[in-house]
Image (cartoon, rainbow, N blue to C red):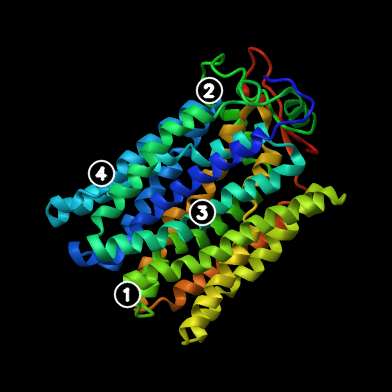
């Protein structure tokens, strides 16, 4: 650790890495959506089958959250995350070759590879939350979390036009090869740049002290490897019986329902319901994403500003979440307009509101028990990403049975309103969860849960 009087700002380099890796993460999730219409045509896939293929990622992603969170706590963020980046990128590349098989084999292979991408990506967001909790003081955590979370919109802004052009010019297969290749290269950069605060060669004593004295969990990875047992199931029980956490989980499920509409069916909506070409849809999809990116960063900045002005943590986090999600329910208005720019305008407004309200990961960094920060983030992400399974399938059935997207948009809008209800009525005060350790030699089931203000 260097020692100079002026604090370094290494945490911003760490945040840039989180932003970039999350951009790649979401771009790899969205490849299937951009390629969706061409895939349907080439492989003869109907709407329901495509919905199940869209959902394949979610089944594995949800199943991998608790094991992924435990691996992060057990082995640390750096190595597990690097392995995660490399493997999901490899499985993305392989999706480009499913067209070499017959139709039925190609569909099964595509489902399985999407499943493996989901499994490999499972540690990513718990890893993000862990790294932010270690590197950022409480009063900067909302902005930091909002910035890495807003990368999901930036991914669409940056890559949707590129991927649309690749599909249009070269075919859907090339999208998977290009995007997967980018991720494989980035996994090597990650290993070079990422370290814990105490071990980073570029940080000085002043920055380390600033982080440590203001709520940063700087020693989170120092004890990794000492415990060899699996997930503490009583810790999980304590979280699952906590009203605040259950409300946060429900809110995230609904927020992700909106996210996965945009990640899966939105480009298909533009092509099939609004008659756009896939090239145009790729560019149009980036416009709501720009608004989502702006809203995402703005939500975190507003939240941390309210905190610095003396408002409670509860008010500072809830106010942008509730206001943003109320705005995002405006997506239903697309059913009542036919002019193309108005459709795009309401989609952009809805995505902006969703961005402002997407502060769930900041709440996780504020509330996660220090013993199991990775596991707690994994549990939160598991509940939130149940929507990655249900949303594509439900929308597929709605489209198949009604022949249009109208009720699908109502379904998405209702998700926003349920999330508002959860934060208004269920969550209550936002506090750091403190877990009671089971007595030495005693049964884990004696553990009780208490909370303390962060």
Where is mark 3, residue-wise? 152
Label 4 or label 2, whichever comes before in sequence order: 2
Where is mark 4, residue-wise? 94
Q: Residues within 10 Å of mark 2 (few under 14, many from 20)?
A: many
Label 1: state its secondary structure.
Answer: loop
Labels 3 & 1 near each other (Cβ < 8 A): no
Label 4: state its secondary structure.
Answer: helix
What is the residue that sits farthest to the left in this orientation?
102
Q: Is residue 71 among the parts visible in the rendering? A: no
Where is mark 2, residue-wise? 74
Q: Residues within 10 Å of mark 1 (few under 14, many from 20)?
A: some
Label 3 or label 1, whichever comes before in sequence order: 3
Residue found 57% across the figure and 42% down from its top: 16
Label 3 or label 2, whichever comes before in sequence order: 2
Residue found 61% across the figure and 49% down from its top: 147
Where is mark 1, residue-wise? 277
Label 1 or label 4, whichever comes before in sequence order: 4
């Amino acid at each position: 650790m260097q020692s100079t009087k002026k604090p370094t700002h290494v945490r911003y380099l760490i945040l840039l890495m989180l932003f970039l890796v999350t951009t790649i993460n979401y771009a790899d999730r969205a490849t299937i959506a951009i390629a969706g219409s061409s895939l349907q045509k080439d492989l003869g896939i109907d709407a329901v089958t495509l919905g199940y293929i869209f959902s394949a990622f979610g089944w594995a992603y949800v199943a991998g959250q608790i094991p992924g969170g435990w691996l992060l706590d057990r082995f640390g963020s750096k190595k597990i995350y690097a392995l995660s980046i490399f493997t999901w990128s490899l499985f993305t590349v392989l999706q480009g070759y499913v067209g070499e098989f017959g139709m039925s084999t190609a569909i099964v292979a595509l489902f399985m590879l999407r499943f493996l991408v989901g499994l490999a990506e499972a540690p990513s967001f718990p890893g993000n939350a862990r790294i932010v909790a270690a590197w950022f003081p409480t009063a900067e955590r909302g902005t930091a979390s909002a910035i890495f979370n807003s990368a999901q919109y930036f991914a669409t802004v940056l890559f949707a036009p590129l991927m649309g052009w690749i599909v249009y010019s070269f075919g859907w297969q090339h999208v998977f090869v290009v995007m997967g290749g980018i991720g494989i290269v980035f996994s090597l950069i990650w290993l070079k740049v990422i370290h814990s605060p105490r071990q980073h060669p570029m940080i000085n004593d002043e920055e380390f002290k600033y982080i440590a004295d203001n709520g940063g969990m700087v020693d989170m990875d120092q004890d990794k490897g000492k415990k060899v047992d699996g997930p503490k199931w009583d810790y999980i029980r304590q979280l699952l019986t906590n009203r605040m956490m259950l409300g946060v989980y429900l809110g995230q499920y609904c927020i992700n329902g909106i996210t996965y509409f945009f990640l899966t069916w939105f480009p298909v909506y533009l092509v099939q319901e609004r008659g756009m070409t896939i090239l145009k849809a790729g560019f149009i999809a980036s416009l709501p994403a720009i608004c989502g990116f702006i809203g995402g960063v703005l939500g975190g900045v507003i939240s941390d500003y309210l905190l610095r002005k003396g408002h409670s943590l509860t008010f500072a986090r809830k106010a942008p979440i509730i206001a943003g999600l109320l705005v995002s329910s405006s997506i239903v208005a697309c059913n009542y307009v036919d002019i193309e720019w108005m459709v795009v305008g309401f989609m952009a407004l809805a995505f902006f509101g969703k961005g402002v309200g997407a502060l769930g990961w900041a709440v996780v960094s504020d509330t996660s028990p220090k013993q199991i920060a990775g596991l707690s983030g994994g549990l939160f992400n598991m509940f939130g990403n149940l929507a990655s399974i249900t949303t594509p399938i439900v929308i597929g059935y709605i489209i198949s049975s009604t022949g249009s997207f109208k009720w699908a948009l109502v379904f998405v809008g209702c998700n926003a309103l349920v999330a508002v209800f959860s934060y208004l009525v269920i969550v209550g005060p936002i506090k750091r969860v403190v877990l009671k350790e089971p007595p030495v030699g005693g049964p884990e089931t004696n553990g009780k849960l208490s909370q303390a203000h962060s």
